[in-house]
Structures are given as C-alpha cells and as structure tokens.
Amino acid sequence: MPISPETIIRVLTISALAGLLGAVGLRLRPGEVVAAVKQSRFTAITVANFVVVPALAAAAAVVFQAPRDTMVAMILLGAAPFAPVVPVFARLARADLALAAGLTAVFPVLSAVLTPVICQLALRIVPGGGEIQFRFVGVLLTLLATITLPLTAGIAAHHYFPAFSRRLLRPLEGISEATGALSLGFVVWTEFAAIIQCGAGVLMAMLIVFEIALGLGWLLGGPSLPARRVVALGTSNRNIALALLVAIQSFAGTPVVSGVATNGLLLILLGLVHVAYWRLRALLGRAP
C-alpha cells in the first residue's frame, strides 16, 4: 500500500526533532537546566502561553473573519505552547540554551493538562465549534516520547558519557538538520495548495499574533538578552505537533488539520526570520 504524505511528514518530523533535541541535550548539564528554569519568570511565562496567546489567536480569528475551520486551527495552535524547535532556534540565535531546554521539556506536561481546557473554552466563540476529543494518556506519552525524552537522554549522556557525547554531537546535528530541512520542504510541497488558498487576511492575523506574542515573551524574559530570546521564541512559536494531535482526534477529515499545518508552517518561517535577523545584527556588532 502507498504511504500517505501525512505518514511521511510525521516520520521525518519526529526523526528530525528527536535528533535535534537530543543534540541540544548533549550540550548541557543537568544543573544548568534546573538553575535556568528556577531563575526564569516561570509563572508569568506559563500564564502568557496558556491564557494570553490563546486569547490573542481567538481575537485575531474573529477580527479578521477567518473561516470556521481556520478559526479552529488558529485556536488549537494558540493553546499549544513552546514548539519543540525552540531549543534549536535558541542554539542558532545564541540564546540561553539551558533555559530553552528546560522550558521545552516541562511544557509538554503542562500542555497535556491545560491545552484541552483552553481549547474547549476558546472554541465556544466558534459557531459549531464542537467538543474536543482529547486522549490525555496518549497525548502525554507522545509529547514526552518525542520532546522530553530526547532532551533528557542527551543531557544524561553528556553527564555520564562526556567523551562519547562530544563525538556524537556533530554527526547527530548534521543528520537531524538535513532531515529537518527535508521535512520542511516536503510540508511546503504537499501543503502548497492549502497555503495559497489560506488567504492574505488569515496569514496577516497569524503574523500579528506571532509578533505580539514575540514581544510579550521578550518582556517576560527578564534582563538577560539570551533569556529574552528564548522566551520570545517559545511564546511565539506554537507546538504544531500537539495542535495536530488535537485536530486529528477531534476534527479528522476536515480542513482544520491542513489549517493547523499551514499556519504552523508560517510560524516556523517567522521564527527563522527572527533568528536570522538576530544573527545578522550580531555579525554587524549591533544591539539586539
């Protein structure tokens, strides 16, 4: 039987993320991660990601009069914080890698509890929004296996096998980055028609939500520039994998699934643009 594009995307994405997150872990020690999270404004960051950003996404969907399925997709993304690509973006942006790893490892646990509640409340504004079907155990295990486990495994390997970790780091990063680029290209190719049909208004709505969330995260990051970049990237880049899980469980066979993929892809591209901008300013020797 032929393999569906969704299966190919899932395999490529999980493989790339697991490798990239594992490579991030290979650069860190457990004490660094714990200390970074303790020093962060964790409560404020949590409220911003689970309350403010979902509210922004819902408001933008209403203001820009997004179609019903697109509105649902935007709300699902808004309720799914801290994309697993955040540690990768943090490394590229020369941000606080320990904080990025710590928050990205913790947020899946919070998401498994809070995301369905936020989605159910926010979907009340959508005509015929429907009920969220959320398999808590399955979603939690999926998030832990694909996000938290690779990170913690890399950190443990660095702690117990430092020499082996140094030899493994570069090859793992190279293979994972190549797989990630292939996955991103395949998503663009398969979802190109949906991206074109999405409409300028919807894309503008997501761009505005992204930039406001980025600014909010920047303010909550504290006085440290590396920490600000992490929280800004984490607050603006939503967890596409989690949003897709909810979409598939609750809205299978509808445009909601492609809407999550399309809008999530836009967020990734916007995140890469900001990372490139920060790197360019650093090369030019300018302020953030």
Image (cartoon, rainbow, N blue to C red):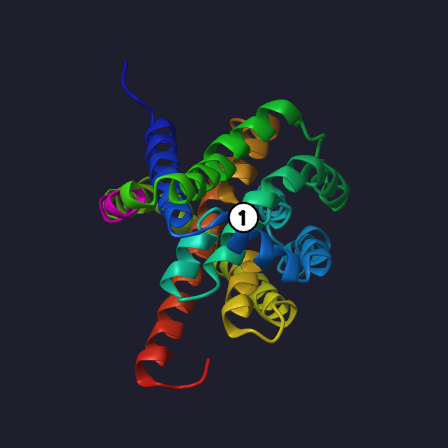
User: Which quadrant does the N terminus fall into?
Assistant: top left
- Of residues 91 and 60, which is closer to you in this image? 91
View extreme (top): residue: 1
Give the residues in magenta: 165-172
Dominant SS in magenta: helix
Q: Amino acid at mark 1?
A: Thr
Asked if residue 169 is among those painted magenta in the image, a careful observer would answer yes
Seen in the image, is 109 located left or right of residue 239?
right
* Image point (54%, 52%), residue name: 31
x then y, percent, for residue 96: 48, 63
- Judge whether 235 appears above or below 285 on screen: above
* Image point (64%, 62%), residue name: 39
Asked if residue 156 is among those painted magenta in the image, a careful observer would answer no
- Residue 280 placement: quadrant: bottom left
Q: Residues within 10 Å of mark 1 (few under 14, many from 20)?
A: many
- Residue 285 placement: quadrant: bottom left
x then y, percent, for residue 124: 77, 42
x then y, percent, for residue 44: 72, 60
- Judge whether 246 appears above or below 198 on screen: above
Q: Which residue is mark 1?
A: 104
x then y, percent, for residue 91: 39, 59
- Of residues 115 and 163, which is closer to you in this image? 163
- Of residues 109 and 70, which is closer to you in this image? 109
